Image (cartoon, rainbow, N blue to C red):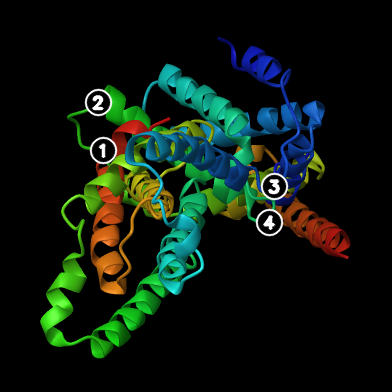
Amino acid sequence: MNTDDLIAQLSEDVPPVRRGAVGLRLVLGILLGALVSGTALVLVLGIRPDLGLAMRGPAFWMKWGYTFSLALAAIVMTVQLARPDSARLRWTWLLAVPVVLLGGLGVAELARTPPGLWLAMWLGHSWMICPWLVLALAMPIFIGLLWSFRRLAPTRLRAAGAAAGLAAGAFAATVYCMHCPEVSAIFVLTWYSLGILLAASIGALLGPRLLRW
Amino acid sequence: MRANEEALRGLMIDGLDGDAAAHAALLRLLVPLLRGFYRRRANGSDDDIEDLVQETLIAVHTRRATYDRERAFTAWLFAIARYKMVDHFRRTRRLQPIEGLEETLIEPDFENALVARLDVEELLAALPGKQAQAIRATRIDGLSVAEAAQAGGIGESDVKVSVHRGLKALVARIQGGAR
Protein backbone atom coordinates (compact mmCIF):
# COMPACT_ATOMS: atom_id res chain seq x y z
CA MET A 1 0.00 0.00 0.00
CA ASN A 2 1.06 3.53 -0.72
CA THR A 3 2.28 5.34 2.41
CA ASP A 4 -0.06 8.31 1.91
CA ASP A 5 -3.07 5.98 1.65
CA LEU A 6 -1.92 4.19 4.78
CA ILE A 7 -1.76 7.46 6.69
CA ALA A 8 -5.20 8.46 5.45
CA GLN A 9 -6.58 5.11 6.54
CA LEU A 10 -4.93 5.20 9.96
CA SER A 11 -6.15 8.75 10.59
CA GLU A 12 -9.77 7.70 10.22
CA ASP A 13 -9.68 6.06 13.61
CA VAL A 14 -8.23 8.39 16.27
CA PRO A 15 -10.07 7.84 19.54
CA PRO A 16 -8.97 9.99 22.48
CA VAL A 17 -6.51 8.32 24.86
CA ARG A 18 -6.63 9.20 28.51
CA ARG A 19 -3.57 9.72 30.68
CA GLY A 20 -2.56 6.60 32.51
CA ALA A 21 -4.04 4.38 29.79
CA VAL A 22 -1.11 1.96 30.06
CA GLY A 23 -1.57 1.37 33.77
CA LEU A 24 -5.32 1.09 33.37
CA ARG A 25 -5.01 -1.56 30.69
CA LEU A 26 -2.53 -3.57 32.74
CA VAL A 27 -4.74 -3.41 35.82
CA LEU A 28 -7.72 -4.48 33.74
CA GLY A 29 -5.79 -7.50 32.44
CA ILE A 30 -4.75 -8.44 35.96
CA LEU A 31 -8.31 -8.11 37.30
CA LEU A 32 -9.73 -10.26 34.50
CA GLY A 33 -7.13 -12.92 35.23
CA ALA A 34 -7.59 -12.62 38.98
CA LEU A 35 -11.31 -13.20 38.51
CA VAL A 36 -10.54 -16.55 36.90
CA SER A 37 -7.94 -17.40 39.56
CA GLY A 38 -10.34 -16.38 42.34
CA THR A 39 -13.12 -18.52 40.89
CA ALA A 40 -10.77 -21.50 40.58
CA LEU A 41 -9.66 -20.96 44.17
CA VAL A 42 -13.23 -20.93 45.48
CA LEU A 43 -14.39 -23.91 43.39
CA VAL A 44 -11.33 -26.17 43.53
CA LEU A 45 -9.31 -25.29 46.63
CA GLY A 46 -11.98 -23.66 48.73
CA ILE A 47 -11.72 -20.62 50.95
CA ARG A 48 -10.24 -21.41 54.35
CA PRO A 49 -13.19 -21.95 56.71
CA ASP A 50 -11.77 -19.67 59.40
CA LEU A 51 -11.14 -16.73 57.05
CA GLY A 52 -13.33 -14.35 59.07
CA LEU A 53 -11.46 -15.21 62.24
CA ALA A 54 -8.05 -15.08 60.52
CA MET A 55 -8.77 -11.61 59.18
CA ARG A 56 -8.88 -10.37 62.73
CA GLY A 57 -5.34 -11.63 63.45
CA PRO A 58 -1.98 -10.24 62.26
CA ALA A 59 -0.73 -13.30 60.33
CA PHE A 60 -3.29 -12.95 57.56
CA TRP A 61 -2.45 -9.28 57.05
CA MET A 62 1.26 -10.01 57.14
CA LYS A 63 0.85 -12.44 54.25
CA TRP A 64 -1.60 -10.28 52.40
CA GLY A 65 0.50 -7.14 52.86
CA TYR A 66 3.61 -8.91 51.59
CA THR A 67 2.03 -10.33 48.47
CA PHE A 68 -0.08 -7.28 47.65
CA SER A 69 2.75 -4.74 48.05
CA LEU A 70 5.02 -6.98 45.97
CA ALA A 71 2.32 -7.07 43.30
CA LEU A 72 2.05 -3.27 43.30
CA ALA A 73 5.83 -2.90 42.95
CA ALA A 74 5.78 -5.42 40.09
CA ILE A 75 3.05 -3.41 38.35
CA VAL A 76 5.21 -0.29 38.62
CA MET A 77 7.95 -2.22 36.78
CA THR A 78 5.53 -3.64 34.23
CA VAL A 79 4.06 -0.22 33.40
CA GLN A 80 7.54 1.10 32.66
CA LEU A 81 8.53 -1.92 30.58
CA ALA A 82 5.30 -1.69 28.57
CA ARG A 83 6.57 1.53 26.99
CA PRO A 84 9.15 1.47 24.20
CA ASP A 85 11.53 3.98 25.83
CA SER A 86 12.18 1.85 28.89
CA ALA A 87 15.97 1.93 28.94
CA ARG A 88 16.16 3.34 32.46
CA LEU A 89 13.97 1.68 35.04
CA ARG A 90 13.04 3.71 38.08
CA TRP A 91 11.82 2.56 41.50
CA THR A 92 13.24 -0.97 41.17
CA TRP A 93 14.13 -0.70 44.86
CA LEU A 94 10.40 -0.85 45.65
CA LEU A 95 10.56 -4.59 44.97
CA ALA A 96 13.01 -5.02 47.82
CA VAL A 97 10.85 -3.27 50.43
CA PRO A 98 8.28 -6.06 51.07
CA VAL A 99 11.02 -8.70 51.05
CA VAL A 100 13.18 -6.83 53.56
CA LEU A 101 10.22 -6.09 55.84
CA LEU A 102 9.04 -9.69 55.82
CA GLY A 103 12.63 -10.82 56.37
CA GLY A 104 12.72 -8.64 59.49
CA LEU A 105 9.48 -10.19 60.73
CA GLY A 106 10.94 -13.62 60.02
CA VAL A 107 14.03 -12.93 62.12
CA ALA A 108 11.88 -11.66 64.99
CA GLU A 109 9.73 -14.77 64.71
CA LEU A 110 12.76 -17.07 64.83
CA ALA A 111 14.07 -15.22 67.88
CA ARG A 112 10.77 -15.84 69.68
CA THR A 113 10.61 -19.53 68.77
CA PRO A 114 12.73 -22.34 70.28
CA PRO A 115 15.22 -23.64 67.65
CA GLY A 116 13.71 -27.13 67.90
CA LEU A 117 10.52 -25.82 66.25
CA TRP A 118 12.19 -23.85 63.48
CA LEU A 119 12.01 -26.58 60.88
CA ALA A 120 8.34 -27.28 61.51
CA MET A 121 7.58 -23.57 61.32
CA TRP A 122 9.53 -23.16 58.10
CA LEU A 123 7.92 -26.11 56.34
CA GLY A 124 4.42 -25.61 57.72
CA HIS A 125 1.84 -28.11 56.46
CA SER A 126 1.89 -27.22 52.80
CA TRP A 127 5.43 -26.32 51.69
CA MET A 128 5.39 -28.96 48.98
CA ILE A 129 2.29 -27.70 47.21
CA CYS A 130 2.25 -24.00 48.08
CA PRO A 131 4.68 -22.80 45.36
CA TRP A 132 2.91 -24.89 42.72
CA LEU A 133 -0.54 -23.61 43.66
CA VAL A 134 0.73 -20.02 43.52
CA LEU A 135 2.21 -20.76 40.10
CA ALA A 136 -1.02 -22.35 38.86
CA LEU A 137 -3.11 -19.41 40.07
CA ALA A 138 -0.63 -17.06 38.37
CA MET A 139 -1.33 -18.49 34.93
CA PRO A 140 -4.76 -16.89 34.32
CA ILE A 141 -3.37 -13.55 35.53
CA PHE A 142 -0.37 -13.87 33.25
CA ILE A 143 -2.71 -14.57 30.34
CA GLY A 144 -4.72 -11.49 31.30
CA LEU A 145 -1.50 -9.48 31.17
CA LEU A 146 -0.66 -10.92 27.75
CA TRP A 147 -4.00 -9.54 26.61
CA SER A 148 -3.05 -6.13 28.07
CA PHE A 149 0.26 -6.19 26.25
CA ARG A 150 -1.41 -6.63 22.87
CA ARG A 151 -1.89 -2.86 22.71
CA LEU A 152 1.34 -1.96 24.50
CA ALA A 153 4.85 -1.58 23.17
CA PRO A 154 7.55 -3.36 25.16
CA THR A 155 11.02 -3.29 23.59
CA ARG A 156 12.82 -5.27 26.30
CA LEU A 157 10.76 -8.39 25.92
CA ARG A 158 12.54 -10.61 28.43
CA ALA A 159 12.44 -7.99 31.16
CA ALA A 160 8.81 -7.14 30.35
CA GLY A 161 7.92 -10.86 30.47
CA ALA A 162 9.67 -11.24 33.82
CA ALA A 163 7.89 -8.19 35.27
CA ALA A 164 4.53 -9.45 34.02
CA GLY A 165 5.25 -12.90 35.49
CA LEU A 166 6.25 -11.32 38.79
CA ALA A 167 3.06 -9.26 38.92
CA ALA A 168 0.98 -12.32 38.02
CA GLY A 169 2.73 -14.43 40.66
CA ALA A 170 2.40 -11.82 43.39
CA PHE A 171 -1.29 -11.26 42.63
CA ALA A 172 -1.87 -15.01 42.52
CA ALA A 173 -0.27 -15.26 45.97
CA THR A 174 -2.59 -12.50 47.17
CA VAL A 175 -5.54 -14.57 45.96
CA TYR A 176 -4.03 -17.71 47.49
CA CYS A 177 -4.06 -16.03 50.94
CA MET A 178 -7.82 -16.70 50.97
CA HIS A 179 -7.12 -20.42 51.04
CA CYS A 180 -3.78 -20.92 52.75
CA PRO A 181 -3.86 -21.36 56.55
CA GLU A 182 -0.11 -20.97 57.15
CA VAL A 183 0.89 -18.31 59.67
CA SER A 184 4.69 -18.11 59.70
CA ALA A 185 6.66 -15.26 58.10
CA ILE A 186 9.57 -17.49 57.07
CA PHE A 187 7.10 -19.89 55.47
CA VAL A 188 5.66 -17.09 53.36
CA LEU A 189 9.07 -15.61 52.64
CA THR A 190 10.30 -18.93 51.29
CA TRP A 191 7.43 -20.79 49.69
CA TYR A 192 5.21 -17.97 48.49
CA SER A 193 8.26 -16.20 47.10
CA LEU A 194 9.36 -19.41 45.38
CA GLY A 195 6.01 -19.66 43.58
CA ILE A 196 6.18 -15.99 42.63
CA LEU A 197 9.74 -16.39 41.34
CA LEU A 198 8.71 -19.42 39.29
CA ALA A 199 6.02 -17.32 37.66
CA ALA A 200 8.54 -14.53 36.97
CA SER A 201 10.99 -17.03 35.45
CA ILE A 202 8.34 -18.45 33.15
CA GLY A 203 7.48 -14.88 32.16
CA ALA A 204 11.13 -14.15 31.36
CA LEU A 205 11.32 -17.37 29.35
CA LEU A 206 8.16 -16.72 27.33
CA GLY A 207 8.45 -12.92 27.02
CA PRO A 208 10.58 -12.81 23.86
CA ARG A 209 8.12 -15.15 22.08
CA LEU A 210 4.77 -13.97 23.35
CA LEU A 211 5.29 -10.23 23.65
CA ARG A 212 6.54 -9.56 20.10
CA TRP A 213 4.63 -7.01 18.11
CA MET B 1 5.21 22.85 9.81
CA ARG B 2 8.59 22.26 11.41
CA ALA B 3 9.41 18.67 12.23
CA ASN B 4 11.12 19.31 15.55
CA GLU B 5 10.59 17.77 18.95
CA GLU B 6 8.28 20.50 20.15
CA ALA B 7 6.03 20.48 17.10
CA LEU B 8 5.88 16.68 16.89
CA ARG B 9 5.11 16.38 20.58
CA GLY B 10 2.35 18.97 20.28
CA LEU B 11 0.75 17.10 17.39
CA MET B 12 1.05 13.80 19.22
CA ILE B 13 -0.68 15.19 22.30
CA ASP B 14 -3.44 16.72 20.19
CA GLY B 15 -3.84 13.34 18.50
CA LEU B 16 -4.09 11.62 21.89
CA ASP B 17 -6.84 14.07 22.77
CA GLY B 18 -8.74 12.82 19.72
CA ASP B 19 -7.72 15.37 17.06
CA ALA B 20 -7.58 13.24 13.88
CA ALA B 21 -6.16 16.05 11.72
CA ALA B 22 -3.23 16.56 14.10
CA HIS B 23 -2.63 12.82 14.11
CA ALA B 24 -2.59 12.69 10.31
CA ALA B 25 -0.20 15.68 10.18
CA LEU B 26 2.06 13.94 12.67
CA LEU B 27 2.18 10.72 10.66
CA ARG B 28 2.96 12.66 7.49
CA LEU B 29 5.82 14.51 9.21
CA LEU B 30 7.22 11.22 10.47
CA VAL B 31 7.58 9.74 6.98
CA PRO B 32 10.74 11.65 5.92
CA LEU B 33 12.15 11.33 9.43
CA LEU B 34 11.72 7.54 9.44
CA ARG B 35 12.97 7.19 5.86
CA GLY B 36 16.14 9.03 6.88
CA PHE B 37 16.49 6.85 9.96
CA TYR B 38 16.12 3.54 8.13
CA ARG B 39 18.12 4.57 5.06
CA ARG B 40 21.06 5.41 7.23
CA ARG B 41 20.70 2.36 9.45
CA ALA B 42 19.25 -0.53 7.56
CA ASN B 43 21.00 -0.29 4.17
CA GLY B 44 18.26 -2.39 2.60
CA SER B 45 16.41 -1.85 -0.65
CA ASP B 46 13.95 1.03 -1.01
CA ASP B 47 11.07 -1.44 -0.71
CA ASP B 48 12.46 -2.76 2.56
CA ILE B 49 12.79 0.73 3.88
CA GLU B 50 9.27 1.69 2.85
CA ASP B 51 7.99 -1.51 4.52
CA LEU B 52 9.77 -0.55 7.71
CA VAL B 53 8.45 3.01 7.53
CA GLN B 54 4.88 1.74 7.13
CA GLU B 55 5.24 -0.84 9.89
CA THR B 56 6.52 1.89 12.18
CA LEU B 57 3.66 4.23 11.27
CA ILE B 58 1.18 1.48 12.07
CA ALA B 59 2.93 0.84 15.38
CA VAL B 60 2.95 4.55 16.23
CA HIS B 61 -0.78 4.56 15.52
CA THR B 62 -1.87 1.37 17.26
CA ARG B 63 0.43 1.79 20.27
CA ARG B 64 -0.09 5.53 20.71
CA ALA B 65 -1.41 4.96 24.23
CA THR B 66 2.12 4.05 25.34
CA TYR B 67 3.38 7.59 24.76
CA ASP B 68 3.87 9.39 28.06
CA ARG B 69 2.92 13.06 27.58
CA GLU B 70 5.58 14.13 30.06
CA ARG B 71 8.43 12.59 28.08
CA ALA B 72 10.30 13.36 24.84
CA PHE B 73 8.39 12.36 21.74
CA THR B 74 11.40 11.63 19.53
CA ALA B 75 12.87 9.27 22.15
CA TRP B 76 9.60 7.32 22.11
CA LEU B 77 9.44 7.35 18.31
CA PHE B 78 12.99 6.18 17.75
CA ALA B 79 12.65 3.48 20.41
CA ILE B 80 9.78 2.08 18.31
CA ALA B 81 11.77 2.56 15.10
CA ARG B 82 14.78 0.70 16.52
CA TYR B 83 12.60 -2.12 17.80
CA LYS B 84 10.91 -2.48 14.41
CA MET B 85 14.26 -2.59 12.66
CA VAL B 86 15.74 -5.24 14.94
CA ASP B 87 12.52 -7.26 14.62
CA HIS B 88 12.61 -6.88 10.83
CA PHE B 89 16.16 -8.20 10.66
CA ARG B 90 15.30 -11.03 12.99
CA ARG B 91 12.49 -12.10 10.70
CA THR B 92 14.08 -11.63 7.30
CA ARG B 93 17.77 -12.40 7.77
CA ARG B 94 17.79 -14.70 10.69
CA LEU B 95 21.35 -15.94 10.26
CA GLN B 96 23.12 -12.83 9.08
CA PRO B 97 24.96 -10.70 11.58
CA ILE B 98 23.56 -7.21 11.80
CA GLU B 99 26.19 -4.63 11.14
CA GLY B 100 26.50 -2.01 13.81
CA LEU B 101 23.62 -3.45 15.82
CA GLU B 102 25.13 -2.33 19.08
CA GLU B 103 25.40 1.24 17.85
CA THR B 104 21.85 1.00 16.65
CA LEU B 105 20.67 -0.04 20.05
CA ILE B 106 22.58 2.36 22.22
CA GLU B 107 23.61 5.41 20.25
CA PRO B 108 21.00 8.17 20.12
CA ASP B 109 23.37 10.82 18.63
CA PHE B 110 22.26 10.10 15.11
CA GLU B 111 18.65 10.64 16.09
CA ASN B 112 19.46 14.02 17.57
CA ALA B 113 21.50 14.87 14.47
CA LEU B 114 18.56 13.87 12.29
CA VAL B 115 16.22 16.17 14.14
CA ALA B 116 18.84 18.95 14.18
CA ARG B 117 19.37 18.62 10.44
CA LEU B 118 15.67 19.00 9.85
CA ASP B 119 15.80 22.18 11.87
CA VAL B 120 18.73 23.50 9.84
CA GLU B 121 17.02 22.70 6.55
CA GLU B 122 13.91 24.42 7.80
CA LEU B 123 15.91 27.53 8.72
CA LEU B 124 17.81 27.60 5.44
CA ALA B 125 14.59 27.32 3.49
CA ALA B 126 13.55 30.68 4.92
CA LEU B 127 16.61 32.44 3.41
CA PRO B 128 16.97 33.72 -0.15
CA GLY B 129 18.21 30.92 -2.44
CA LYS B 130 21.69 32.32 -2.99
CA GLN B 131 22.43 32.77 0.70
CA ALA B 132 21.09 29.33 1.61
CA GLN B 133 23.17 27.73 -1.14
CA ALA B 134 26.32 29.55 -0.05
CA ILE B 135 25.87 28.51 3.58
CA ARG B 136 25.07 24.94 2.65
CA ALA B 137 28.15 24.71 0.42
CA THR B 138 30.68 26.28 2.80
CA ARG B 139 29.32 25.37 6.23
CA ILE B 140 27.56 22.04 5.76
CA ASP B 141 29.12 20.37 2.73
CA GLY B 142 32.56 21.69 3.70
CA LEU B 143 33.60 23.31 0.41
CA SER B 144 36.12 26.15 0.32
CA VAL B 145 34.96 29.62 -0.72
CA ALA B 146 36.69 29.19 -4.10
CA GLU B 147 35.01 25.81 -4.70
CA ALA B 148 31.64 27.16 -3.66
CA ALA B 149 32.07 30.14 -5.99
CA GLN B 150 32.94 27.83 -8.87
CA ALA B 151 30.06 25.45 -8.16
CA GLY B 152 27.59 28.29 -7.93
CA GLY B 153 28.98 30.18 -10.92
CA ILE B 154 29.37 33.37 -8.88
CA GLY B 155 32.30 35.43 -7.59
CA GLU B 156 34.20 34.55 -4.39
CA SER B 157 33.33 37.85 -2.73
CA ASP B 158 29.70 37.19 -3.62
CA VAL B 159 29.89 33.86 -1.73
CA LYS B 160 31.48 35.52 1.30
CA VAL B 161 28.88 38.28 1.39
CA SER B 162 26.03 35.77 0.96
CA VAL B 163 27.31 33.60 3.81
CA HIS B 164 27.77 36.61 6.03
CA ARG B 165 24.31 38.05 5.36
CA GLY B 166 22.67 34.66 5.52
CA LEU B 167 24.19 33.76 8.89
CA LYS B 168 23.30 37.17 10.26
CA ALA B 169 19.70 36.68 9.15
CA LEU B 170 19.65 33.21 10.74
CA VAL B 171 21.00 34.49 14.05
CA ALA B 172 18.36 37.21 14.08
CA ARG B 173 15.69 34.65 13.28
CA ILE B 174 16.76 32.18 15.95
CA GLN B 175 17.06 34.87 18.60
CA GLY B 176 13.71 36.22 17.57
CA GLY B 177 12.23 32.73 17.86
CA ALA B 178 13.77 32.20 21.29
CA ARG B 179 12.35 35.38 22.73
Which mark identifies residue B4?
A: 3
SS type, badge 1: loop
Relative to residue A46, is residue A115 depicted above or below?
Answer: below
Q: Earlier in the sequence, mark 1 or mark 4?
A: 4
Residues tagged by mark 1 and mark 2 found on one chain of the structure: yes
Q: Earlier in the sequence, mark 1 or mark 3?
A: 3
- Estimate the x, y position of residue B145 in percent, counting from the top left: 61, 54
Q: Amino acid at mark 4?
A: Glu
Q: Amino acid at mark 2?
A: Arg
Q: Residue tagged by mark 4?
A: B70
Residues tagged by mark 1 and mark 3 found on one chain of the structure: yes
Tell me, yes or no, whether the two marked residues, 1 and 4, touch with CB atoms within 8 Å: no
Estimate how packed mark 4 is, as few (under 14), some (14 to 19) or many (20 or more) residues with alpha carbons within 10 Å.
few
Q: Earlier in the sequence, mark 4 or mark 2?
A: 4
Q: Nearer the viewer, residue B4 or A33?
A: A33
**Left or right of B116 on screen, residue B170:** right
Q: CA distance from mark 4 to mark 2?
A: 37 Å
Q: Residue tagged by mark 1?
A: B98
Tell me, yes or no, whether the two marked residues, 4 and 2, touch with CB atoms within 8 Å: no
Q: Nearer the viewer, mark 4 or mark 2?
A: 4
Tell me, yes or no, whether the two marked residues, 2 and 3, touch with CB atoms within 8 Å: no
Q: Earlier in the sequence, mark 4 or mark 3?
A: 3
